[in-house]
Image (cartoon, rainbow, N blue to C red):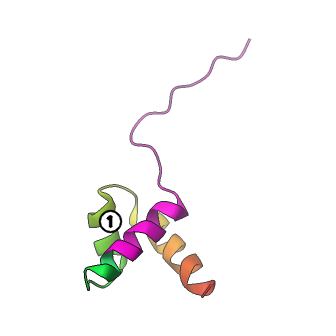
Amino acid sequence: MIKAVKQRGCPGISIDDVRQAVDSLQKQGRHPGPVNVRLELGRGSYSTITRYLRAIESRK
């Protein structure tokens, strides 16, 4: 029998979380860089945020 392992720490962020933060920052007239996105979300690693920002930018 395999037991489920409870994940520790905060839940991760999704690309949708980053998109919403970018939209919010742009409406505020702020640059949607990794630092501001992290401040807007209040969580997430800079590497994950940067990866999602690049993915969002490449889809434009």
Secondary structure state at the residue bearing disc 1: helix
Give the image location of residue 47, x and y in percent.
45, 67
The mark total stands at 1
**Which residue of the protein is positioned furthest toward the top in this rendering?**
1
Residues shaded magenta: 1-24
In the rendered structure, the answer to whether residue 19 lies left or right of residue 46 reads right
Left or right, 2 with reference to 38: right
Decide: few, some or many residues near mark 1? Use Cα within 10 Å; few <14, some 14-19, many ≥20: some
Q: Is residue 13 above or below residue 2?
A: below
Locate the C terminus and report the quarter of the image it occupies: bottom right
For this view, does 33 lie left or right of residue 12?
Answer: left
- Among the 4 quarters of the image, the one containing residue 37: bottom left
> What residue appears at the point 26 percent right and 83 percent down from the top-left corner?
30
Give the residue number, with chain letter if any, for mark 1: 38
* Residue 19 on the magenta segment: yes
Location of residue 38 (image quadrant):
bottom left
Identity of the residue furthest to the front in this view = 27
Q: Which percent across, then down, holds residue 54?
A: 54, 80
**For the point 34% across and 82% down, which residue is it?**
26
42 to 24, vertically: above or below = above
Residue 11 lies in magenta, yes or no? Answer: yes
Q: Residue furthest right?
A: 1
Query: Disc 1 marks which amino acid?
Result: Arg
Task: Name which residue lies at 25% across and 80% down.
Answer: 28
Where residue 7 sits in the image (x, y, percent)?
A: 49, 33
Q: Quadrant of the N terminus?
A: top right
Q: Nearer the viewer, residue 60 or 45?
A: 60
